[in-house]
Amino acid sequence: MKKIVLIFSILIFNIFFARIILAKDVLPYYKNHIQNYGIGVYAIPNEVEIYDSADKNSPITEKIRWNINGVAYEKNPFAAKKSFISFIPSKNLVFLAVSDETSDWVEVIYNQEGNSKGWIEKSKDNNFYTWKDFMNKYGRKYGLYFFADIEDTKKTLYTSPDTNAQIVRGIIYKSIKIDLKIIRGNWALVQILDYDKSTHVGWIKWREDNGYLYLFPKLNNN
């Protein structure tokens, strides 16, 4: 009997992990990578169950497991780039967008293309971040980068967080490092290091008024 149970368990394990996607690190490099921003992001644990509603008695719509080798879905083998805001398992920086939250649950978007949503019960650590908190924490830790298709007019440094303020510097063509100092609303105080080793400090918009981002934390920085 014990052998039968063991064989059955191994079979189930193999069936599940046959769907594993060997995903490389995923970061958004273009504006349309993130199609549904929601209200923030949630750092998911290595194993997570996604429910139809904020109730553990509701149907489970998906189960996700991830490790250093990739990510596996029990029901729908989405590519990681369609699901995650970022997927860097070596640093435990695995985030899904959040569309809603309660005191104990978050509603996550687990397929950006299909706008598939479901509820995850918050962990004790409550790894939910508003976009402002996420940018403030990880942008200050790792620095920032512009999305590749952001218009040049969005890359202007100002003396204060106002587009009518004096311009510190024009278009940032060859910046190799963008250090975040302060977040204030939709503006960020940054220090720019250029390839010629010159530095510039000023305010720049990090997101549009509708929530779309111009910059993102450089999470793959060492």
Image (spheres, rainbow, N blue to C red):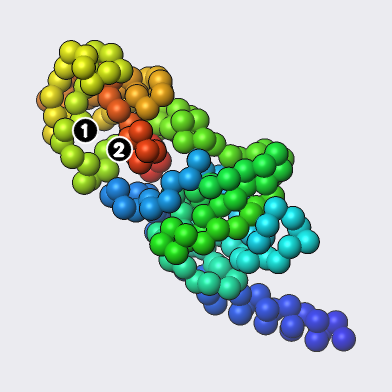
Instruction: Give the percent coordinates (x, y) of residue 60.
Output: 68, 65
Q: Quadrant of the C terminus?
A: top left
Say which label, 1 or 2, has the lower sequence index. 1
Q: Quadrant of the N terminus?
A: bottom right
- Residue at 77 percent across and 80 percent down: it is 6
Q: In this rendered view, identify the residue nearer to me: 89 or 147.
A: 147
For label 1, the crowd category at 10 Å Cα-Cα, with few meaning under 14, some 14 to 19 and many 20 or more, is some
The answer to whether one can see residue 177 in this image is yes
The answer to whether one can see residue 23 in this image is no
Instruction: Give the percent coordinates (x, y) of residue 8.
Output: 74, 83
Rendered view: 181 above or below 57: above
- Measured in 3D between alpha carbons, the distance from the residue under mark 1 to the one under mark 2, in whole angstroms, is 8 Å
Please tell me the numbered disc located at residue 213: none
Q: Tag 1's secondary structure?
A: helix
Please tell me the numbered disc located at residue 214: 2
Mark 1 in CB contact with mark 2 (< 8 angstroms): yes
Q: Residue furthest right?
A: 1
Q: In this view, does 162 lie to the left or right of 7?
A: left
Provide the residue designation for mark 1.
154
- Residue at 51 percent across and 55 percent down: it is 109
At label 2, the amino acid type is Tyr
Q: Tag 2's secondary structure?
A: loop
Instruction: Give the percent coordinates (x, y) of residue 164.
Output: 21, 17
At label 1, the amino acid type is Lys
- Residue 207 falls in which quadrant of the image? top left
Q: In this view, does 98 lie to the left or right of 30?
A: right
